[in-house]
């Protein structure tokens, strides 16, 4: 089985379409989405329709919950908050119901999936440093966990009692190691590259591979501005920050 893990789409239709084109060209058996379909971008309903149609496992992210009032937005930054309020206005009722129905975690083929962190999925903690990751390894079974949330593609590798942060590149799973893989963001990468990010997991070969896909970020920017959303949300797409 080969899985594509696509996360943090954030209502960016252009990035999602480009990623799916790449996914289809690679050929995968299933698409898994660890959350944040909406927020920031201009096409929430369209992105939900596509993900609902294409992904076999879909989890909730903090922006998905915020868009339907299930998570408070007082801790969101002003731009994110404005985008959530806009999303609440334009979200179709069936899309809102769909977002409310999404689970926090899933296990597929021995791999664990969560939007933010395995230990407290509903608290939306970030796993940024090896010290954060070490604790999270206690909260899932199996050897590999896939997350999104920070919009930084990276890998935490645990061997014995130590944990290291590695840059995203293809790697083979090793028996004596455990992994937390952040697949990066489709619709709002923040790791200094504007290209959409996702990962694939090939079970039989035990290989994880990262992918970057160029897309029409200028069109996504135009739509954000046209929707009256903060210009900062458009500009950051061009630089991936
Ligand atoms: Zn996100």
Image: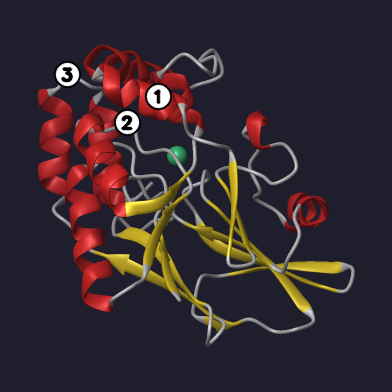
Q: Is residue 127 above or below residue 137?
A: above
Closer to the N terminus: mark 3 or mark 1? 1
Q: CA distance from mark 2 to mark 1?
A: 6 Å
Kindly indicate the quadrant of the structure image that contains residue 10. top left
Q: Is mark 2 within 8 Å of ligand 1?
A: yes
Q: State the mark number for residue 94.
A: none
| Element type at mark 2 | loop
Label 3 SS? loop
Q: Position of residue 80 (x, y in %)?
A: 40, 24
Identify the residue at the far right of this view. 161
Percent from the top left, x then y, of residue 207?
Answer: 52, 82
The quadrant of the rendered image in which ligand 1 is seen is top left
Residue bearing mark 3: 228
| Element carrying mark 1 | helix
At label 1, counting other C-alpha atoms closer than 10 Å, the crowd grade (few under 14, some 14-19, many 20 or more) is some
Sequence-wise, the earlier of marks 3 and 2 is 2
State the separation of the CA atoms marked 3 and 1.
Answer: 13 Å
Residue under label 1: 80
Q: Earlier in the sequence, mark 2 or mark 1?
A: 2
Q: Mark 2 packing: few (<14 Cα in 10 Å), some, or many (20+)?
A: many
Asked whether the beta carbons under mark 2 and mark 1 sit within 8 Å of each other, the answer is yes
Q: State the mark number for residue 40.
A: 2
138 lies above or below 8: below
């Amino acid at each position: 089985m080969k899985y594509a893990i696509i996360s943090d789409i954030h209502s960016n239709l252009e990035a999602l379409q480009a990623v799916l084109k790449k996914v289809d060209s690679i050929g995968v058996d299933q698409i898994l989405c660890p959350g944040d379909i909406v927020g920031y971008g201009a096409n929430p309903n369209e992105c939900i329709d596509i993900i609902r149609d294409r992904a076999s496992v879909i989890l909730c992210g903090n922006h998905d919950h915020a868009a339907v009032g299930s998570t408070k937005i007082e801790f969101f930054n002003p731009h994110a908050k404005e985008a959530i309020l806009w999303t609440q206005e334009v979200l179709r009722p069936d899309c809102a119901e769909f977002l409310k129905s999404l689970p926090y975690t899933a296990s597929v083929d021995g791999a664990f999936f969560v939007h933010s962190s395995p230990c407290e999925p509903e608290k939306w903690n970030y796993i940024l440093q090896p010290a954060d990751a070490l604790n999270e390894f206690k909260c899932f079974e199996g050897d590999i966990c896939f997350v999104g949330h920070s919009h930084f593609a990276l890998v935490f590798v645990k061997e014995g009692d130590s944990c290291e942060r590695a840059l995203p590149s293809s790697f083979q799973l090793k028996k004596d190691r455990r992994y937390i893989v952040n697949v990066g963001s489709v619709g709002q990468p923040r790791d200094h590259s504007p290209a959409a990010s996702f990962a694939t997991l090939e079970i039989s070969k035990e290989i994880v591979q990262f992918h970057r896909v160029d897309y029409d970020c200028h069109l996504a920017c135009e739509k954000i501005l046209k929707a009256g959303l903060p210009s900062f949300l458009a500009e950051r797409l061009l630089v991936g920050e």
